[in-house]
Amino acid sequence: MNNVKAFCFDVFGTVVDWRTGVAREAEYFFLKHGLSDIDPYEFADAWRDLYQPSMQACRSGERPFTRLDVLHRENLETVLANYKLDVGAMDANELETLCSAWHRLDPWPDVISGLTRLKQKYIIAPASNGNIALMANMAKRAHIPWDLILGAEVTQAYKPAPQAYIRMADILAIAPGAICMVAAHNDDLRGARECGLRTAFVPRPTEHGFGQTKDLAAASDWDIIALDFNDLAEQAGC
Amino acid sequence: MNNVKAFCFDVFGTVVDWRTGVAREAEYFFLKHGLSDIDPYEFADAWRDLYQPSMQACRSGERPFTRLDVLHRENLETVLANYKLDVGAMDANELETLCSAWHRLDPWPDVISGLTRLKQKYIIAPASNGNIALMANMAKRAHIPWDLILGAEVTQAYKPAPQAYIRMADILAIAPGAICMVAAHNDDLRGARECGLRTAFVPRPTEHGFGQTKDLAAASDWDIIALDFNDLAEQAGC
């Protein structure tokens, strides 16, 4: 790991707690519309369940690369319809506000301190499937100290497609082996390792709520296995 | 200007003093090669003179979009050859180091304080013809506190082509009229205004050295005409 120059981060789940953040705004939306019988956490999960299939259409070439903000909006309408709600009767601005809940997610408590330490020595950037504006607005609101914003819109590829990692290294002009991908998801790290990147696993055991069964532990001998971002900084010599 | 959400900056000349920075590294290179009779400032100017023509080939569609690091390297070989030097006999790593002088330019003295103030209230980003790695490395070294890095490689267009401004607004998901382009160059602001952006002029009267004749003053009624970045922050209510 001595030659690593940049740490690139998965964001949804790894840096921010998307489930709590989306549920918080969904709860407000449902209360306002007299729909308080809908569990906002279940709703957040249902919305998120459409995430991978919607990106898969772009990965497979079935549709051209499309920003996550657009996919999130399409998926929001789908999930509301699945709840038997009349999306057409809803105010477009209110739907847009709910959709932009993804721009207002809070980082896990160790993130700002850990990233601030890592930033002293390394380039730090999100390597998220989120689009540029989404990442920029999130970082601005939560004071996430990225050096620059990378990710799907910059590489025009959704992880774990190899191009998402390979183009990132090319854009940074840093060899893949001098970039460390950080994620709470083993499949993301598998994709990164296959492209020659270094890998760091940070578990987020409540990303999917209490009772989570997936990604509770490292599934391989990743280069770093850390408790949280402060431990990651420590292990990276910061 | 009340609805402005983001300030986007020209970089070479406006944020950093490219001429002094390039001359400094060229002087070292020439001393090392026993070429101390070459004036490093004249050399920097000659290298920079190839900048616009090389981008013009991309703007016109004569060649596909090509990163500025690549154009800088091609132009370096051309300018060395123009000085009757044998580029082929030079060490490739040394040429690469000289070429990356553009990554190690210093900001004008008012930049860090002015940007730090603006960042409290606005999104701040470079909208440079420089590529992403160039901007990221420059910012990391000089502690330029960008929120994100935009510019030619992100938009795949070289200013003042309209797509450079229009795609930037689209990527930020901010209306053009809520973005203020900041530059020491009237033609950059003209391009931005034609695309509906707000404009701020900050003069850099020694960008081209003492005796500069171009861009000494605002050539139009730009939305803001500031003395420097601190005055810009002041006028922007920071």
Image (spheres, coloured by chain):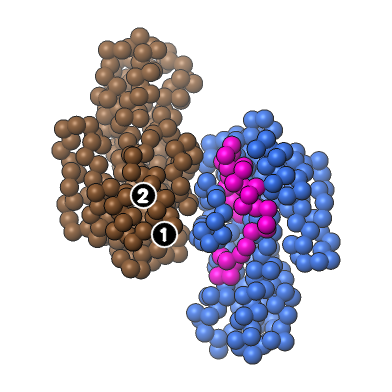
Chain colours: A blue, B brown
Above or below for B107 versus B78: below
Q: A141 or B91: nearer the eye?
A: A141
Kind of residue sitting beneath label 1: Tyr
Left or right, residue A148 beside residue B76: right
Mark 2: few, some, or many residues within 10 Å (few <14, many ≥20)? some
Q: Chain of mark 1?
A: B
Q: Where does the magenta region start and end? A: A100-128
Is label 2 in a helix, a strand or a loop?
A: helix
- Does residue A21 belong to the magenta stretch? no
Residue A141: % across, % down = 53, 62
Disc 1 packing (10 Å; few <14; some 14–19; many ≥20): some
Q: In the rendered image, which residue does mark 1 sit on? A: B122
Q: Chain of mark 2?
A: B
The Cα atoms of the two marked residues, 1 and 2, are separated by 12 Å
Identified at 34% across, 19% down, the residue is B27
Image position of B225 with respect to A1: above or below? below
- The local secondary structure at tag 1 comes to loop
Q: Quadrant of the N terminus of chain B?
A: bottom left
Report the residue at 15% width, 38% height from top.
B213
- Tell me which corner region of the image, top left, top right, bottom left or bottom right, holds residue A64: bottom right
Q: Amino acid at mark 2?
A: Gly
